[in-house]
Amino acid sequence: MFSNKVLRFLFNLKLPFALQNGVEVLDAHQRKDVQQACTAFYKKYYNDNSKRHTLIGINPGRFGGGITGIPFTDPIRLEKNCGINNDFQKKQELSSVFIYDMIDAYGGSEAFYKHFYITAMSPLGFIRNGKNLNYYDDKVLLKDIQPFIIDCMQQQIDFGLKTDVCFCIGEGENLKYLQKLNNEHKWFNRIETLPHPRFVMQYRLKRKEEFIESYISKLKSVV
């Protein structure tokens, strides 16, 4: 089952190198409550052997996947939109708000996750001085993390991901890095880009519906 492969992958994530420069890892999947939430989520939406297209973000943030263990899913959306009760502190993450508004417009969580799997270049998140840190924002981290990113991507492709096209969440550094590695490893035939939800929510909020329509148009073109 797709769900079993995802859960085995998430619960065995481990950075194969020591962090430097004050960087700390968000390794939520080692917690029992996170494992319970992830198990409920993936068993609910991925308990089949269907192949899916993937959306690839940067790395989990401290108010979303860094808490629930599920990409772009904060505790509020996990309960309200996915029907999975949880005792996590009910703080919202802007990116999660956008993603689930998009998922609702697509047709809801069941319809969306039937065809799509969301992950990140680094399935583990990072913080420094209590703030989110993108994997590419620290040169030492970027150099050290490459073998881990490559291994994680290959493992996830082996779940049964469709490789004709993937969707990169983020049109800047995340896209550049994915393109670089994809040129070397030939994971996907084509990479489609999607604007990052945080960029939309922070700087283009008045155009949110326009961006949601753009997401859905691109996603539905491959279903």
Image (spheres, rainbow, N blue to C red):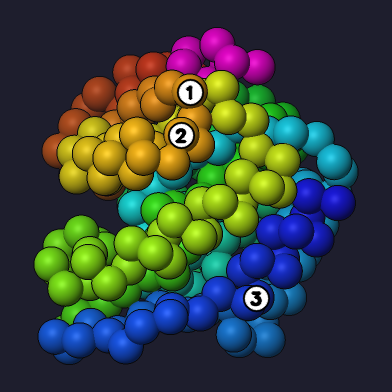
210 to 86, vertically: above or below = above
Other-residue count near label 3 (Cα within 10 Å), few / some / many at <14 / 14–19 / ≥20: some
Question: Quick one: SS at disc 1?
Answer: loop
86 to 179, vertically: above or below = below
- Residue type beneath disc 2: Lys
35 to 112, vertically: above or below = below
Other-residue count near label 1 (Cα within 10 Å), few / some / many at <14 / 14–19 / ≥20: few
CA distance for labels 1 and 3: 29 Å
- Residue type beneath disc 3: Phe
Left or right placement of residue 201 versus residue 40 in this view:
left
Left or right placement of residue 164 versus residue 223 in this view:
left
Any part of residue 212 in sight = no
Q: Single out the mark in the foreground, 2 or 3.
A: 2
Left or right placement of residue 180 versus residue 86 in this view:
left
Residue at 39 percent of width and 23 percent of height: 192
Observer-nearest of 118 and 175: 175
In percent of width and height, residue 167 lies at: 44, 31
- Please give the label number shown on residue 11: 3
Report the magenta residues as a range: 217-223
- Please give the label number shown on residue 189: 1
Please identify the quadrant where the C terminus is shown: top right
